[in-house]
Image: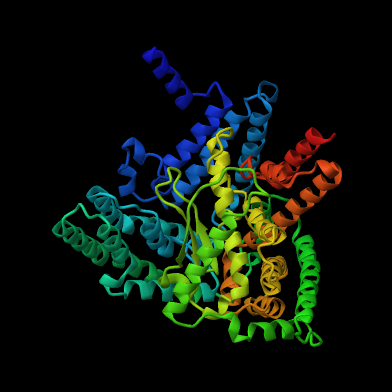
Amino acid sequence: MVILGGLFFWHEWSARPFYINNFFNRFALKIVLQRPEALTSLHFLEPKGINGHNAELDDASPEFTDQLFEYFAEEYEVLKTYRNEDLDENERISKRIAEYLFEFAKEAAPFARHNYPVNQLFGVQNSFPSFMESQHQVNTIEDAEHYISRLQKLPRKFSQALRGIKLRTEQGIIPPKFVIARVVEEMQNFSNTKVEENILYVALKDKLAKLSEIEQAEKDAILQQAKTAIVEDVYPAYVEMTRYFVGLADRADDRDGIWKLPNGDQAYRLALKLFTSTDYTPDYIHHVGIQEVARIQNEILEILKSEGFDTTQGFSAAIGELAAQEKFYYPDTEAGREQILADYQTIIDEINDGLGQAFNIPFDAEVEVKRIPKFKEETSAGAYYIPPAIDGSRPGVFYANLYDIKATPKYSMRTLAYHEAIPGHHFQIVVAQGLENIPYFRRFAPFTAYTEGWALYAERVAWELGFQRNPFDNIGRLQAELFRAVRLVVDTGIHAKRWTRQQAIDYMSANTGMAISDVVSEIERYIVMPGQACAYKVGMMKILELRAKAKESLGQQFNLAKFHEVILNNGAVPLDILEELVDRYIQENKS
């Protein structure tokens, strides 16, 4: 029996698997096994005593990316051999999702380098320190030694990434001038930081401090190794990367949209397809955005008027009057920032205890609130979320940007917490991770319109459930939705209509009432992530459309909690498949 079991495993791993779910799981496992950083984040091998990957870094070479696209093409041919008539309904859905991903990969392969892998928002230069601080766990001395190993191997990863950047330069794929200026400043500040104050050293020191069973002398020895690695390996890698970008500045210009790249218009349509999982044109998205901006602004003005604000001068003046009131802000001190984090946690704990009427899904997963690390907060977005480890050894984390105190008015905090944590990203991702009736790749499927659409929809659900009774909190919710509607306009404006960075900043500033520091970082984000900003509103509108359809079709039979089960219990999916799932729910529940 052991021999037969071994032969079956070998066949399922090396040849065409007998069962399609084995094919899906093999595909996902082969992908993740090539990415040691992803393995660290998922943390599912460590409980089995396997942890060597924690000493390694991902391959950032252009050759690795090319091989990945080749592997996708090979696996797509295998997938085609499974006949739909041999599959059950859930397997057919999985197959369709996989076909969607493989088809997109085939279409996107010629544009694999139409991006800026080092920019002010993400890339090896700022993702590595964040990853080491937030996701590399240190529970033993061996874990700490793996930490040191990763520091020592950083030069190789930077060298691989730099090869890809040089290939892009040869093709005329060069970031705008402001991007180069931002990353040069960021990397110079990072490598000029005193070692003992660098996040890589401080994070390791903090992790070791929690290990009471280890002698201080052993901890000191590890920290000395870390200091040596930062000085001899990490900092020189940053200096080399900085030197290249300083030289690249002379070849850059101030054109900001992806339209300037080779076949840039086609590349943008692909970016929109990737992030919205639709074939919507830039013109359509732009027009919808303008309509939604007007609608939401009118709703905000009605509330402001009812609260005694002068709305006769239009939206910008009225929202500016609201934003100018000091009562809505915390003290611009470290104590004030600590209070913001504490209040976020209170908001999350409150709604987590009150979701019963809208959700039947069991949920018990901790989420922490932390400040975005100081070294990158100036150029980061207002917030982001890091999912928990699968085994529960590391909680989900909601990172809040506290760089500019004026960017965190009290009336916006509930909405942001609902989006990033509960019932938004944290809720949706933890539910997906726990699904047992779908293959692993569906638990982590990268459909941004679904995931971000859900998080934006979650903001509205929280309001509908009564968690934003204060009219100013409701303005905060509407401002957040307005912000996403404006994104439709400025993203398509920059990348399809050839707006300048300043045009986009002016439009967003005039139409949202956001702090200028947030506006600038957001516009600069859209420039380096074409299409991503459109996913939020497109996804939310589709979920609301499907909910309205279900309500109208089912009448008294409609149940909000059951609707949410349909949306959440299939993992992330393209929007057209989501509609099919809701249509099936409607048919099954019609009386």
Q: Is residue 231 above or below residue 86?
A: below
* Residue located farthest toward the top when viewing the structure as drawn: 1
Q: Is residue 120 visible?
A: no
Towards the viewer: 60 or 25: 25
Q: Residue at x 67, y 25 (%)?
A: 88
Towards the viewer: 343 or 503: 343
Q: Is residue 466 above or below residue 57?
A: below
Corner quadrant of residue 82 = top right
In the image: residue 501, left or right of residue 180: right
Corner quadrant of residue 311 = bottom right
In the image: residue 189, left or right of residue 27: left
Q: Is residue 383 visible?
A: yes
Q: Residue at x 54, y 68 (%)?
A: 381
- Residue 316 is situated, as x and y percent measured from the top left of the image, at 73, 83
- Residue 171 is situated, as x and y percent measured from the top left of the image, at 54, 61
Label count reads: 0
Quadrant where the image shows the C terminus: top right
Q: How is the image coloured?
A: rainbow
- Residue 29 is situated, as x and y percent measured from the top left of the image, at 46, 36
Corner quadrant of residue 239 = bottom left
* Residue located farthest toward the left when viewing the structure as drawn: 217
- Residue 322 is situated, as x and y percent measured from the top left of the image, at 67, 83
Q: Residue at x 80, y 74 (%)?
A: 298
Towards the viewer: 211 or 578: 211
In the image: residue 34, left or right of residue 270: left
Q: Is residue 249 above or below residue 540?
A: below
Quadrant where the image shows the N terminus: top left
